[in-house]
Amino acid sequence: VFGDGSACGWDPKGGDTFTQRFIEVKPVSVQKEFCWKDMLKKYMNFEANVQAGRETLPFAEKIIASNISAIQKELEKTVWQGNESAGIDGYIAQITAESTVTKVTATDVVEGVEKAYTSLNGDALEKGAYMFMSWTMFKQYVMAKNAECCGNAPIIDANTVSYVYPYDTRVTIVPVAGLEGTN
């Protein structure tokens, strides 16, 4: 609150409200047991490929790498979408609960991006805004934008990992695997 600054003295007015986000940490685990008898056929096939020079990783390393990759994908999905059985809320649930959220409905992803951009206020634009979407929706957006322009010369590279909104460089569209299956 502005006050008269021409006089000496101290006359505080106004105040600040402090808020915070709570991030609840929950332990999760992945436990598996493998029976060598079930894996014998696959393992023997693997050994034959190793002997022929087709595989370079040991069999156990291949299983571990595959499991780590699957866990990473599930973790990202959980961060965004939550996991009800583990009692974890994701970003979507937290964002949806906000009173300042503007929900947009659209017939296609291009219209959705346009409506989301239109709903951004000046504060969001001043700080820089990010629009997150699934890779599937991002691919649809890239294809639609490329179809709008230049015949067979695409304007957006299909291999891009993010895209600066063409009408406002303060807005970046970012695809994330954790939003697959959401709208």
Image: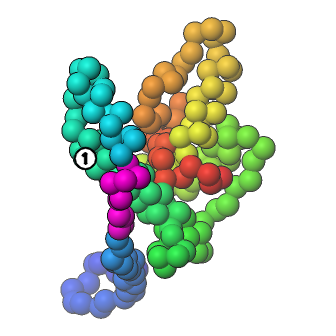
- Position of residue 124 relative to residue 21, above or below, is above
- Position of residue 149 relative to residue 142, above or below, is above
The picture places residue 67, in percent across and down from the top left corner, at 35, 52
Q: Which residues are magenta?
A: 30-39
Element class at badge 1: helix
- Position of residue 124 relative to residue 88, above or below, is above
| Residue in the image at 36% along x and 78% along y | 26
The picture places residue 179, in percent across and down from the top left corner, at 54, 52
| Residue in the image at 27% along x and 33% along y | 47
Instruction: Give the residue at mark 1.
Output: 60
Disc count in the image? 1
Residue 103 lies in quadrant:
bottom right
The picture places residue 99, in percent across and down from the top left corner, at 60, 74
| Residue in the image at 65% along x and 52% along y | 183
| Residue in the image at 35% along x and 59% along y | 34
Instruction: Between residue 112 and residue 88, name the one nearer to us.
Output: 88
On screen, residue 140 versus residue 128, left or right, reads: right
The picture places residue 83, in percent across and down from the top left corner, at 51, 70
Q: Is residue 105 visible?
A: yes
Dot 1 amino acid type: Ala
Q: Main secondary structure of the magenta part?
A: loop
Instruction: Between residue 18 and residue 66, name the one nearer to us.
Output: 66
On screen, residue 53 versus residue 130, left or right, reads: left
Q: Quadrant of the N terminus?
A: bottom left
Within 10 angstroms of label 1, few (less than 14), some, or many (20 or more) residues?
few
On screen, residue 115 versus residue 7, left or right, reads: right
